Image (cartoon, rainbow, N blue to C red):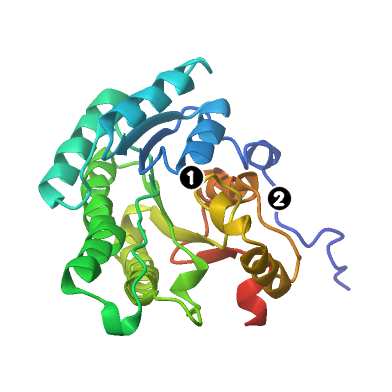
Amino acid sequence: MNQLATNLTPQIDLDAMDRLFDIKGLRVFLPGGYGALGEAIAMAMTRRGARCTIAGPDGGKAAALAQRLREFGVDSDGFELDARHPAAITEVTDRAAKAMGGIDVLINCVGIQREQALLDVTEETFDQVYEINLKSAMFLAQAVARHQIAQGSGGRQIHLLSVRSQLALRGRGYSAYCASKGGLVMLVKQHAMELAPHNITVNGVAPTFIQSERIRPHLERQGFRDFILDRNPLGRIGDPVEVVGQIITFAAPAGSYMTGQVVYVDGGVTASQ
């Protein structure tokens, strides 16, 4: 009579388990990296040994953050990037790849919001939000994928989204923003399918309101703050570190079998609405 094996789990690679969240040595391209969440992501990645290249429309801010990151003992660069233009995206991506010797991870933090009520939306504003939130993601992904495919060692692409990719907002003018972030969800899924044969994963991280200087004025309005807290099952505003943790997971070996996914870091908002 055959006896059942005492251990039904396949042989576990303990060394691989120890490396689950090891990102040391990764070459990370961070467009939009000096923004509210981008800076926290850049600092966390660098402190854990990754090398980051920052890019954004203000070259001075990108360079200043790169200088701060170098204080952690890891080389870093900062470039000016107008993400509205695919040619500029290609040029700066090529510069980032040259500076780091390649690109292992794209963390796309590019994004804006221009609030206009439905009856007031202008073509100019809608196009601006679309260009920066969705069109730039398409061509950042393309430019980075070309390098990752040529390198032949796989890679990761991570896009920063928002709960507005799934939820509309009553009483506010979010047409352009919600449309662009919702479109980005499908871009993540499609790119994941096209890049899977090259061992490149594509995922999104979608936070709700997170503590930052950008949203501080809104949170200081008692009525708005109460609205945000009342609808949040955990009853608090998220911390940037809580978003960074999911970014690291997607970039690290721990995220190697996840692709085409969007994780909502929102205190349970999207689960309850």
Q: Residue furthest left?
A: 87
Left or right, 227 with reference to 29:
right
Percent from the top left, x then y, of residue 61? 35, 30
- Identify the residue under disc 2: 11
For the residue pair 77 and 145, the one nearer the viewer reads as 77
The residue at the point 63 percent across, 44 percent down is: 241
Residue 36, numbered label? 1
What type is the residue that disc 2 sits on?
Gln
| Residue count near mark 2 (Cα–Cα under 10 Å), binned few <14, some 14–19, many ≥20 | few
Q: Amino acid at mark 1?
A: Ala
| Coordinates of residue 150 in the picture (x, y in percent) | 22, 42
Q: Secondary structure at mark 1?
A: loop
Name which of mark 1 and mark 2 comes first in the sequence. 2
Task: Indicate which label's residue lies in the foreground, 1 or 2.
Answer: 1
The number of numbered discs placed on residues in the rendered structure image is 2
Q: Secondary structure at mark 2?
A: loop
Q: In this view of the protein, can residue 23 be seen by the observer?
A: no
Pinpoint residue 21: horizontal percent, then vertical percent: 61, 40
- Identify the residue at image location x=37%, y=53%: 200
Q: Residue at x 26, y 40 (%)?
A: 57
- Disc 1 crowd rating (10 Å Cα; few below 14, some 14-19, many 20+) is some
Q: Is residue 83 visible?
A: yes
Q: Which mark is residue 179?
A: none
Residue at screen point 89% across, 73% down = 1
Q: Residue 123's image quarter? A: bottom left
As drawn, 34 above or below 67: below
- Left/right of residue 80 with respect to residue 5 in the rendered view: left
Identify whether 152 is placed above or below 76.
below
Which residue is nearer to you in this view: 219 or 77?
Answer: 219
| Figure check: 173 above or below 258 | below
Q: CA distance from mark 1 to mark 2?
A: 43 Å
